[in-house]
Image (cartoon, rainbow, N blue to C red):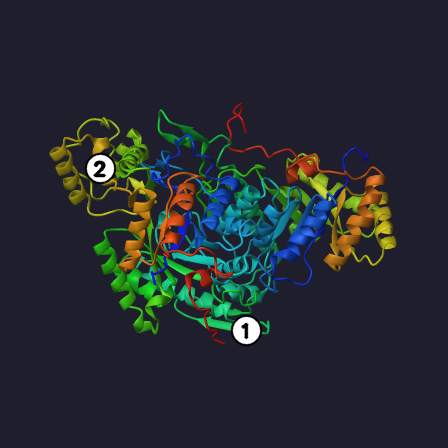
Amino acid sequence: MPATRPLHLAVDIGGPPHYEARHYTALAQLAERGTLDFVTLGDSFARPGLDALAVLARVAPATERIGLVPAVTTTHTEPFHVSSAVATLDWVSRGRAGWSLEVSTTEAEAALFGRRPAAPAADLWHEAREVADVAARLWDSWEDGAEIRDEPTGRFIDRDKLHYVDFVGSTFSVRGPAIVPRPPQGHPVTVIDATAPEPRAAAVRHADVALVRAGDPAAARALREELRDRARAHGRDPERLRVLVQLPVALHTTADAVALAGLIGDWYEQGAAEGFQLRPAEPERDLALLVDGTVPVLQHRGLMRRFYPGATLREHLGLSRAANQYAQAGSPS
Amino acid sequence: MTKQMHLAAHFPGVNNTTVWADPRSRSQIDFSSFVHLARAAERGRFDFFFLAEGLRLREHKGRIHDLDVVGRPESLTVLGALAAVTEHLGLAATVNATFNEPYELARRFASLDHLSGGRAAWNVVTSFDAFTGENFRRGGYLDRADRYTRAAEFVATARELWDSWTPEGTPCPFAHQGQHFSISGEFTVPRSPQGYPVVIQAGDSGEGREFAASTADIVFTRHGTLEAGREFYADVKSRLAAYGRRPEDLKIMPGVTVVLGDTDAEAQEKAADIRRRQISPQNAIVALEQIWGRDLSAYDPDGPLPDIDPDPDSELVKGRVKVGDPFTVAAKWRALSEAKGLSIRQTVIETSGRQSFIGTPASVAAQLTEFVAADAADGFILVPHLTPGGLDDFVDQVVPLLQERGAFRTEYSGPTLRSHLGLPTPVRKG
């Protein structure tokens, strides 16, 4: 892979839970100083921690460029609410939102809701695919330019540019349209951890960013090819799928940070990965060394940008704004 | 000492009170509009900022209603972001108890309370209609009669979750068995700064009043005359003792609109102009169709009222609350139109209700203070008609006068919304 596209770097700012905003704000600001593409924050009903989407909404006005990708679970939540919340994160961050789809497989999580029994991962990921599908439909259910404010006719919107989605899935249905106008990116960025087979099947259909695990560059390259081939088989342009390798990191010294830069740069130049999602053992410690030690080396090698040329997460990732599936051919989308 | 009032600001709504055609009107969805209004409210030392909720776009004659503002962000997410650009202002979200589950919603509100340092509030609303249900997993499953029992059990369950961590920060298992919810496990969030986020209840029915008396910290009510306000206030406050609560434990805050002018006459003129702008010719016909339940698009808004009768079984309007018996309303409108020689549009404007407080800043400050001193309200929720500048004049011109009168705070006395409202931190039930 020619190194014409910048290397994409994301970092997870999870770790032991904190219950105050400033912890997460400081980490996201640090990652932004390092011009990383986005931060991720995990979430689960099964362990202590704040609602990740709420945390990153709180972080949004305290940052300017970095992408914000909370985990969002689809098993016990309402697809309509999920779609609205992710769209709203995109509005409050002015186009920097993503979401990382996850499912809730345990009996313990099912008991917190008391609505449905635990189900096999395959069923839940089938449902998660439907949630990704309906979310995209809801985001498209308002065409761009639907708000017209036409005084002579007294109309605030052109309702011909609003669309019912009439989605009927295996476990839910949604009539639409969305309550939230189309978000700034069209579609906030969909991230899926494609390690296990069930989420991988979702990723090749719906992900803008797929996360994979690989022990060496050859394995990473093979996974990337597999994902691209399968995306193509689903009628997608593989150039619109970014595959990032998950990398657990624990940085204790500047030497560790420089060594990490060496590894990242080598994998990237060998065409094994378009980028990495780093998963620090201790976010506060590791992220400081990453930004001050690893990033400058990668910038010096010409693999990483020194500033954000774009404003939205899609722009950081080199992904164009999503086309609208309901817009008439020829009309602006 | 003068009784202190509480003030809140509502984001201009998805209805015809918001004048989108005004040249000063800006985006209803850009975050900058929310920041502008919230910062104005905080500059005015308001208690809280209030967002409504939408779960289905309104329809009229089987099509999406297009004459008013349409679309809004999801409130909890916007308020989480506003917590970053404000320091003291309470942050209130309207969230439906019918199309949510206690565990997730309790967690989202506890998260907002932590992330804002104790400023979260929840306006608990209910719905039962299958129309809204079409966007949700369960559809229209709830009987109208069960709305409040579900809401009451929902809030009680949320409070069990909010109480479930020890003060030392250890999660304890919870188990709730009830008519509407049977859930168990561990909550993921420690007890939040306010203990419980503030609970707001809107609704003036007997059931609603009882729910408020048993459960709410604030009642969001309709504004009326001083006498009507005093009656409502006395009635709701008298219901508190039965639940072991003191009168001051529940604040009564009517939603109000304010129009200011340099003279009273100028203010009246501005108020009349705003009412005309709120009722466009097209909106006048829609307002008529909502009463008549018939397609009246062939009628001239500047002509007389239709002489046909309303259709009481009409399915014309979806996603709106029906107000009153259509025959009674139609008869009243006809009588008014005939007596004063009013056209359709003039009749709708005439019946749409005047703004609550109209006058110079000094006279509005005096009226607001009188309402509170007379126990017709504990404060007000202002509903501006312009986004995002609709609060600026009130904050700059009326708030200082209220402060001079000693009727409103000059500084926040504490960090949490409960401290602004003078509400105690709830005792943990372990």
Q: Residue at x 48, y 54 (%)?
A: B89
Residue that mark 2 sits on: B350
Residue B40 bears which disc, if any? Answer: none
Q: Identify the element where label 1 is drawn.
A: loop
Residue furthest toward the bottom? B430
The lab-note entry on whether marks 2 and 1 share a chain reads yes
Callout 1 amino acid: Pro
Q: Is residue A172 above or below residue A44?
A: above
Q: Nearer the viewer, residue B237 or B134?
A: B237
Alpha carbon separation for disc pair 2 and 1: 58 Å
Residue B320, visible in the rendered structure: no
Image location (x, y in percent) of residue B388: 45, 39
Say few, some or many: other residues with alpha carbon within 10 Å of mark 1 (under 14 / 14 to 19 / 20 or more): few
Q: Position of residue B91 (x, y in %)?
A: 47, 54
Q: Is residue B404 visible?
A: yes
Q: Residues within 10 Å of mark 2 (few under 14, many from 20)?
A: some
Residue B373 lies, with reference to residue A89, above or below; the image says below
Residue under the image location 53 percent in, 51 percent down: B86
Left or right: where A108 falls relative to A151: right
Q: Amino acid at mark 2?
A: Glu
Residue at numbered disc 1 = B173
Q: Position of residue A176 (x, y in %)?
A: 45, 42
Q: Quadrant of residue B359?
A: top left
